[in-house]
Amino acid sequence: MKLEELLQSLPADQWKVGQIYSFDWHDGPRAGVCSLAVPGGEFYFQMIDERYNPDGLDDRIFRLSELPAGSVAEVLSVIPDLRSSDEAVRQKAERQLERIENSRRPTSLVILSQYMDYFEGCWHVDPARTDKTDWFAVLGIAPREPASEDQPTELRP
């Protein structure tokens, strides 16, 4: 089953993370790999838009690329070798990561998440669309209401 079908089989707020590794981090993950325990599947994620949230973590939209099964475990297994003092070991690990990255299959999926541990939405978009745009406006995601002391922060409908 393709990643698109798998992820659309269950609402995003019911997905459960299996393993994750971030290659780019700034106040949270910006790019990396993730496997889902529920509903399954593995993907490479890359942030395409971000919106400031004054009450906590910023909202982030990520574009997903499908990875073959076992890719995330393989990434995690070679990370220690990237820190090796042995140049040959480091180069081999870099080639493995490059091979995994080259195995990505583009999808039409973008997701909304703040920290890649909980997912708030999943949408199909034109995979060829790479222009710099306000993805929140394109997807119709309203800004969060400021939280009061009595209620958690929520997205407006």
Image (tube, grey):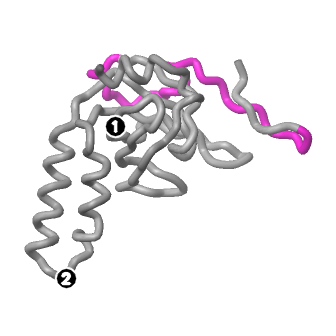
First to last magenta residue range: 126-150
Picture layout, residue 143 above or below residue 157: below
Closest to the observer, 4 or 124: 4
Closest to the observer, 55 or 32: 32
* Quarter of the rendering occupied by the C terminus: top right
Question: Neighbour class for label 1 at 10 Å: few (<14), some, many (≥20)?
Answer: many
Residue at image coords 37%, 40%: 45
User: Looking at the rendered structure, which numbered label has been put on residue 50?
Assistant: none
Residue at image coords 26%, 38%: 69
**Count of picture labels:** 2
Picture layout, residue 93 above or below residue 11: below
Residue 128 lies within the magenta run: yes
Residue at image coords 33%, 25%: 3
The residue singled out by tag 1 in the image is: 42
Tag 2: amino acid: Ser
- The part of the image, by quadrant, that contains residue 125 is top left
Residue 31 lies within the magenta run: no
Tag 1: amino acid: Glu
Image coordinates for residue 36, horizontal then vertical, percent: 43, 38
Picture layout, residue 27 above or below residue 15: below
Q: Given the current orientation, which residue lies at the most extreme left position?
A: 88
Image coordinates for residue 109, horizontal then vertical, percent: 38, 24
Q: Given the current orientation, which residue lies at the most extreme bottom position?
A: 85
Q: Nearer the viewer, mark 2 or mark 1?
A: 1
Question: Neighbour class for label 2 at 10 Å: few (<14), some, many (≥20)?
Answer: few
Residue at image coords 41%, 37%: 48
Image coordinates for residue 38, horizontal then vertical, percent: 48, 32
Image coordinates for residue 6, horizontal then vertical, percent: 39, 22
- The part of the image, by quadrant, that contains residue 52 is top right
The residue singled out by tag 2 in the image is: 85
